[in-house]
Image (tube, rainbow, N blue to C red):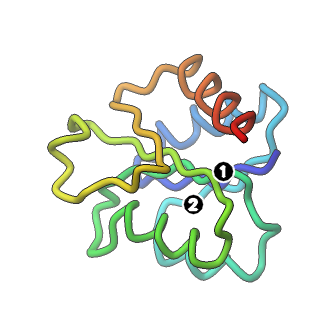
Amino acid sequence: MRVMLLDDDDLLRAVLTEVLEDSGLQVVDFADPSEALGSFGAVAPPDVLVTDIDLGSSMTGIDVAAAARALWPSILVILISGLPANHTGQPLDPRDRFLQKPVSNSRLLSMIDQMNSRP
């Protein structure tokens, strides 16, 4: 399974990349939403997008998720944020899943497994 990880926090991105790779997932990670969007035609389509909502730029993780879903309609999306889901400032797509920071590694992996096994 291929995962695209997008987070502007270098340490968190490195930790999550290691956790995901150690569980056998293929990970391509990005710090910048423009860089991630620019890669859409160059990388193999991911099965899952894990993205922070607040990326420190004018583009949010929700914007990136919408662009990814336009290109890959079946992509699974997990949004992460330090704020509770009802305080993100944008409505979440009902197909998406949400994890509040600090992210539990086991919860993230479990969520990916659950989403991947859905009909």
Q: Is residue 113 left or right of residue 77?
A: right
What residue lies at 59% left-to-right and 17% top-to-bottom? 106
Look at label 2 and name its amino acid. Phe
Q: Is residue 58 left or right of residue 12?
A: left
Q: Position of residue 101 (x, y in %)?
A: 34, 30
Look at label 1 and name its amino acid. Val
Q: Quadrant of residue 14?
A: top right
Q: Which part of the image, by quadrant, shows the N terminus?
A: top right
| Label 1 environment density (alpha carbons within 10 Å; few <14, some 14–19, many ≥20) | many
What residue lies at 21% left-to-right and 38% top-to-bottom? 83
Q: Position of residue 30 (x, y in %)?
A: 57, 60
Residue 101 in sight from this viewpoint:
yes
Residue 36 in sight from this viewpoint:
no
What residue lies at 57% left-to-right and 70% top-to-bottom? 68
What residue lies at 74% left-to-right and 34% top-to-bottom? 117
Mark closest to the chain's N terminus, 1 or 2: 2
**Disc number at residue 48?**
1
Which one is nearer the viewer's eye here, 97 or 50?
A: 97
Mark 1 or mark 2, which is nearer to you?
A: 1
**Residue designated by label 2:** 30
How far apart are labels 1 and 2 at the CA level? 14 Å
